[in-house]
Image (cartoon, helix red, strand yellow):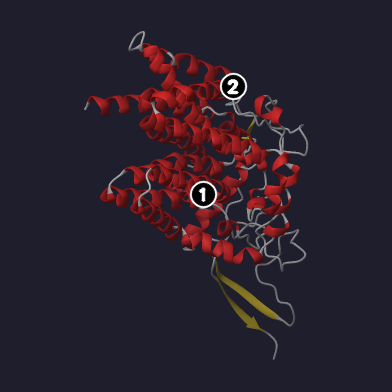
């Protein structure tokens, strides 16, 4: 009972400590960023599709000047399903996106805490959860890029790895339950953000191999496979058409060619100016790719703590080595030295921005920070059993101090939606989900939904829904 109360208390503490990070999201209205307005417009289009009975939605019917745009067929639908649920509860589209972003950040920290406390105790789990929340890349996604879908994927990651770990550590009956839960979470990850799901599937595979090497059991391998089958099976409706039909749109000719322009330089990970601009070739990007001062310090402590763990907690040392390896790999994938990997690993160019591997970095550094806290706490406990918790105070203070400029928005703006009417453009920078055979691309809204190409006829529109158009044609030609 006491143990459960401690966990509940620490979860509440994480929620409270998270407030400065999400305070801007509690204010009315919206703010300027890269992609956020696109999310709001697409949520409105998703709502129209749902009410039109087009389930699952695949087409944004009003985009591209009313010709439609297949965004939902190729991109992360979960953020819009969740946003639609919030909207149907009575919130407008802007508030729905803000609420979802807020909840997502807090839940991601809680998930990391629940996972890492298994290894590093309550204090280590608490520190890991806070490092996961207060990482500059999280604020970059929230307030600079407006990448709500990628932000959402961070909730699934610690839960997915926690259930994967539970499969390896449990008996056969528990393995089946955890494979089912892990499969559900994996399906949610696949529906959350395509690119994050892809790059973390790589890490998930390494994680599975790691646990099989620690506890080589055939039942573990079979349940890992079962988890993957469940995850892929539950999300088949999305990823199968997306892969099968990607040749019909412009994906291969747009985003897959951009990655050479977006490698970063090692100094940018340590110190790069915060900004609201874009990613460009070279080290003069308009946005920051730093991984966080507190994260860096605790990662350094974690590396030194490896010796202590190797001597006293060998299995925990193995876990720490894994996280350090993930961190090193993440840095390599972001630097120009990794060009041969990008050029030869299938599908990797679709990641588009090498700096997206910062997601690996902050994921690993949260765990490394938890390990550092565990070892520091073990040393301090020799002096006084309450002293380890004092260590949390400077960690929280450092996270607040070094991130205080990152949880601010650029400027407040007014967002006007078009309703159920044609919208110029696609909400993506290269119209990459527009059909390849529609050339030239439209540049204006057509005068009528249906036009008579030749002859004389009267057209009466009866219904113009997302996936079904009905109209009567009265031909005057004899």
Pick out the residue farthest to the front.
311
Position of the N terminus, as image quadrant, is top left
The answer to whether the residues at label 2 and label 1 have Cβ atoms under 8 Å apart is no
Given residues 352 and 222, the one toward you in this image is: 222
Q: Secondary structure at mark 2?
A: helix
Q: Which residue is mark 2?
A: 293
Say above or below: 414 vs 299. Answer: below
Say above or below: 281 vs 24. Answer: below
Task: Check residue 191 in the rendering and tell me which mark sits there, or answer none.
Answer: none
Say above or below: 454 vs 188. Answer: below
Mark in front: 2 vs 1: 1
Q: Which residue is mark 1?
A: 201
Residues under labels 2 and 1: Cα distance?
28 Å
Closer to the chain start, of discs 2 and 1, is 1
Q: Secondary structure at mark 1?
A: helix
x and y, in percent, of residue 347 in the image: 63, 55
């Amino acid at each position: 009972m006491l143990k459960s109360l401690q966990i509940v208390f620490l979860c509440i503490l994480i929620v409270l400590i998270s407030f400065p990070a999400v305070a801007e999201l509690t204010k009315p209205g919206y703010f300027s960023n890269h992609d956020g307005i696109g999310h709001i417009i697409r949520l409105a289009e998703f709502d129209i599709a749902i009410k039109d009975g087009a389930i699952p939605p695949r087409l944004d019917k009003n985009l591209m000047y009313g010709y439609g745009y297949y965004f939902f067929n190729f991109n992360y639908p979960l953020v819009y399903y969740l946003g639609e649920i919030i909207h149907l509860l009575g919130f407008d589209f802007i508030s729905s996106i803000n609420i979802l972003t807020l909840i997502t950040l807090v839940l991601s920290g809680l998930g990391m805490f629940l996972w890492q406390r298994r290894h590093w105790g309550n204090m280590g789990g608490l520190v890991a959860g806070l490092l996961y929340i207060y990482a500059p890349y999280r604020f970059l996604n929230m307030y600079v890029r407006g990448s709500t879908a990628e932000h959402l994927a961070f909730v699934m990651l610690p839960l997915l790895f926690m259930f994967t770990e539970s499969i390896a550590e449990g008996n056969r009956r528990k393995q089946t339950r955890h494979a089912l839960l892990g499969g559900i979470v994996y399906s949610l990850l696949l529906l959350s953000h395509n690119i994050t799901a892809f790059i973390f599937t790589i890490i998930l595979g390494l994680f599975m191999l790691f646990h099989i090497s620690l506890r080589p059991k055939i039942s573990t391998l079979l349940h890992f496979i079962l988890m993957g089958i469940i995850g892929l099976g539950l999300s088949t409706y999305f990823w199968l058409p997306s892969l099968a039909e990607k040749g019909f749109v412009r994906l291969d000719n747009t985003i897959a060619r951009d990655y050479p322009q977006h490698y970063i330089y090692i100094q940018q990970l340590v110190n790069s100016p915060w900004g609201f601009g874009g990613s460009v070739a070279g080290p003069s990007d308009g946005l920051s790719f730093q991984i966080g001062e507190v994260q860096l310090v605790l990662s350094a402590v974690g590396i030194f703590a490896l010796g202590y763990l190797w001597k006293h907690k060998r299995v925990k040392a193995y876990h720490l080595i894994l996280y350090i390896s993930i961190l090193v790999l993440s840095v390599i994938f972001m630097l120009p030295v990794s060009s041969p990997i990008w050029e030869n690993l299938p599908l990797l160019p679709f990641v588009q921005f090498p700096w997206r591997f910062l997601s690996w970095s902050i994921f690993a550094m949260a765990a490394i920070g938890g390990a550092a806290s565990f070892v520091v706490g073990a040393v301090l406990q020799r002096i006084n059993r309450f002293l380890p918790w004092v260590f949390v105070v400077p960690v929280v203070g450092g996270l607040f101090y070094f991130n205080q400029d990152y949880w601010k928005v650029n400027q407040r703006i007014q967002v006007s939606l078009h309703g159920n009417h044609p919208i110029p453009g696609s909400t993506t920078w290269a119209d990459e989900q527009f059909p390849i055979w529609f050339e030239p691309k439209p540049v204006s809204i057509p005068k009528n939904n249906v036009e008579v190409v030749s002859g004389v006829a009267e057209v009466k529109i009866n219904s113009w829904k997302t996936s079904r158009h009905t109209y009567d044609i009265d031909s005057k030609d004899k």
